[in-house]
Image (cartoon, coloured by chain):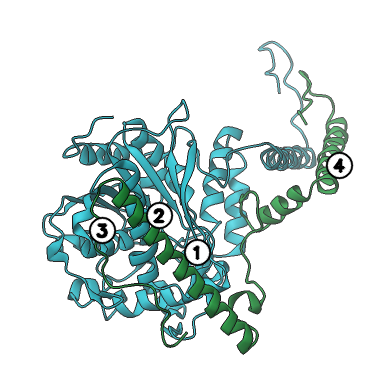
Chain colours: A green, B cyan
Amino acid sequence: MADEKPNSDPPLVERWLAEQQQWQRTLRTYLDSMVKSDDFLTHIGNAMRGSLLAGKPYPTTPAPSAAAPESPADDKLDQILFALRQLEGQVQDLRLSVEEIRSGKKPRAKRPEPGAPKDSQ
Amino acid sequence: MTEAEPDAPTPEPPADEERELEALLGLSQRNRRKLERLHEILTTPGHYGTGATPATVVYRENKLRLLRLLDESGAPRNGPPVLFVPAPVSRYFIMDLLPGRSFAGHVAAAGFDVYLADFGTPTREDRFADLEYYVNGLVRRCVRTVATLAGEESINIVGYCLGGTLSLLYTALYPETVRRLVLLTTTVDGDVEGGIPWVAHRMGLAGEDYDNPRLVPAAEVKSWFEMLAPGSNSLAGRVSDLWDRLEDSPDRLREVRTMASWVDDVVPAPGRLLAELYRKFGPGVNGLMAGTAKVGDSALDFSAVKIPVLSVSAEKDTIAPPAGVDAITRIVPQAEVLRLPGGHVGIVAGRSAAALWKRTVEFLGSGNTREA
């Protein structure tokens, strides 16, 4: 989309016509990109929010269910999932201790156990 | 327009209308070129959303990945181990932004064996994650992994922003495992007005429920940061800023886009973690300075932190005001305080970040005897 600027200026009316054609080309390029690429739609959406964020949409408030559970059952499920995450960490601690023993290092003493889920969970 | 020859008859000046049309034509061309540049930037590849330095994942847990940076041949380095701990409410790659603009890459190039924690993006069940989970869990296991891989008893830690808070708390609990600690724009005095804790307080963090936490949406976390960035806290302001920037060179705009892809890519935050930080270290409580802070059931003893500590603040930091950062010497008296010109992000990954990188390598280098 390079500018086509002549060395000696043609009459104003001709330059306006050329400019109009350039605008048509520019807009057609945008339309082509919008049709061909979902990524471009995301990026132009971000730009319309004043952001050059690449690869994902600009953060907006998500549906309420993404932030907090919709039902008590969902809440319980989340608590169980997080408790499993904590257990995953404890298993990793055990694995690291075994590796330390294997390598001849003294296993690290651990301060209070992070593990158990809290009462409120 | 070409200048008239001295002997040539002076051309008639354009009529007012013609002059206006000329000016409008110039304006039209200028705006069209900006749109063309925007299209070019949005459609050409760049470096966005990942670290810049080759790395391998050496540990995974929940959403966390621990990356170990590799040298040009794809092998890990042998130097003293350094763990970078970024803030868990933003993306890790600010520490490794671009080839040639990477803090972690610079430290690695100096011969250190560099590890970088990527806390990932929390999902709904992670809203229950608290300080204990981060400090006594994720950070501690990262340190253990690094120490095991490096065959060392203690390692160096570089913590940024909230990642610095986690690193400081970890060091107070496990001082024997840390050789040297670098804290970047890490607030310790919660009573110093301004910065993210105060904005979050005004925007409702005080009402965050510890017992029934929610996953605080990224847009909400982002709104706190936007409140601190004059000129960009409104849609019109941001669009206007971007429009003005479109006259920059494409190379400069690609750099801006890389940085924007970090600034605007805030992740959701565990509500319990934010509620706990606010209740323990926030305005009015100020548990770090008051000596009342705990992680889980463990009281924090900063007098146990005898290692060399470097704390870096930024003169123009609106997120972590420098006075609240420099207060580290009141709880860790031997800490060296360095205040650099620039802002919260600029000193780490901006064009003038080299001053921080150089000082960090010097600080980590002295006292770390293992050669690369």
Marks 4 and 2, Cα distance to the nearest angstrom? 43 Å
| CA–CA distance in space, label 4 to label 1 | 34 Å
Q: Residue B86 carries which label?
A: 2
**Label annotation for residue B27:** none
Tell me where residue B291 appears, x and y as whole percent: 18, 74
Question: In the rendered view, does B358 fall on the left or right side of B73?
Answer: left
Residue beneath label 1, please? Answer: B226
**Point 47% across, 30% down: residue:** B74
Q: Which residue is drawn at 59% across and 76% down?
A: A67
Q: Where is residue B305 in the image (x, y as percent from the top left)?
A: 16, 59
The percent coordinates of residue B339 (x first, y second) are: 24, 50
Q: Could you tell me the amino acid type at mark 1?
A: Glu
Q: Which of marks 1 and 2 is nearer the N terminus?
A: 2
* Front residue of B152 and B286: B152
| Chain letter of disc 2 in the image | B
The mark closer to the camera, 1 or 2, is 2
Distance of mark 3 from mark 2, alpha carbons?
24 Å
Q: What residue type is labelled 3?
A: Arg
The disc placed on residue A108 is: 3
Judging from the image, what secondary structure is the residue with disc 2 in?
A: loop
